[in-house]
Amino acid sequence: MIDFEPSDEQRLLIETTRQFVEREMLPHEEMLESTGRTPPELAAALKRKSMALGLYACNMPESVGGGGLDAVSVTLVEKELGRTSLALAECAHRPLNILAACKGEQVGAFLEPTMRGEKRDCIAMTEPGAGSDLRGMQCRAVRDGDDWVINGTKHFISQAEVSDYCVLFAATGEEDAGRGARKRISAFLVDFADPGVEVLPGYRNVSHRGYPNNILRFDNARIPNWRIMGEEGDGFALVNEWLGPTRLTVAATCVARAERAYDIALHYAAEREQFGQKIGRFQGVSFPLADMALEIRLANLILLETAWKIDRGTVTPGDCAMAKLYCSEMLARVADQCIQTIGGMGVMEDLPLERIWRDARIERIWDGTSEIQRHIISRELLRPLGC
């Protein structure tokens, strides 16, 4: 049975994170939006404070020095952080859960410094010619004695310019898949100081100002064999371990932004007067408010149920896909309707609605497009029936 009542510890987590966001992050939103960058000193200060509060690495197991929170608790933290802009929320950086797979020399060189906040990680999968089709990636790693030689390009790599290394996914060969050959994908820990690795500026983005995306180029970058994560060809297994929780993070932040936008629209409808009465009395305004409240309620339910399933060990890729799909598309609808409720002021920078509306657009694309989520869900439904 699902218990929707948060525990005392979870209430404390929610309140602690909420106060942190309100006191330390929200005051900087206007500056971030106008400049498009997060000052390094601000990012460092927010990181120190998040570590002091126990928010940093709260998603990682206690066995590797993390907070060891269950998935429901991590989701509640992510949701509170999601109320502010992504660039500010990322200052309270949570290391990639995939790093828990580090072994041997990888622990001291990458995992432990990251857990101490001395190094920052990012993930490198997407390529100019391979987004949703990971098997289509052209970036290759070729074994040469005790090393791997990497060549290729990645793009849309979030936060690379403020990171020290990446978890890189590259093709390392081919295997027979029954319907023809398919690429074997492996994961590597690549330091941005390695020779042959170049971090380049990315693209100007309508969403998430101050949250950089970058291009990575690998030109005969040579890394030692101990930097491969797992066995050669294990990349897809590692991707699946990372993608589920990441999609739930996207869902949580979408719900948080929808709630923030809705609260602004609701209070506006209760205070704004036109034609001699509060506009909330008009059905053209009040009925959409009711619809938005319903959508947000449903999004919260699917979000918490999915996290609960992770803790029970019963979650499936389809569960995470449903959460990401519904919550991201719900945010788009709610953000648009909130602006419609407020009218002209909704698209002015005086209110955060226009930012929430812009930021919402990317959520249906990254970490798997809405179309990919529907594919995952439909395959999970039809395969047991032999289709």
Image: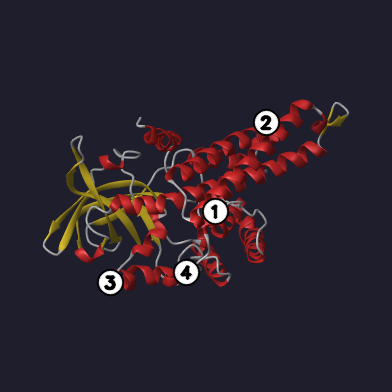
Distance in Å between CA atoms under marks 4 and 1? 20 Å
Q: Amino acid at mark 2?
A: Gln
Image x and y of residue 28, in percent: 61, 56
Left or right, residue 48 beside residue 294: left
Q: Residue furthest left?
A: 145
Which of the 4 image quarters holds residue 340?
Answer: top right
Q: Are marks 4 and 3 in contact (CB under 8 Å)?
A: no
Please give the residue where the numbered disc 1 appears in the rendered image.
308
Residue 106 horizontal side relative to residue 316, left or right = left
Identify the mark at residue 140; answer none if there is no mark. none
How far across and how far down the image is residue 274, in percent? 83, 29
Q: Is residue 254 left or right of residue 289?
A: left
Q: Which mark is first along the chain, 3 or 1?
A: 3
Residue 209 seen:
no
- 1 or 3: mark nearer the eye: 1
- The residue tagged 4 is 66
Question: Quadrant of the rendered structure where residue 167 is?
Answer: bottom left
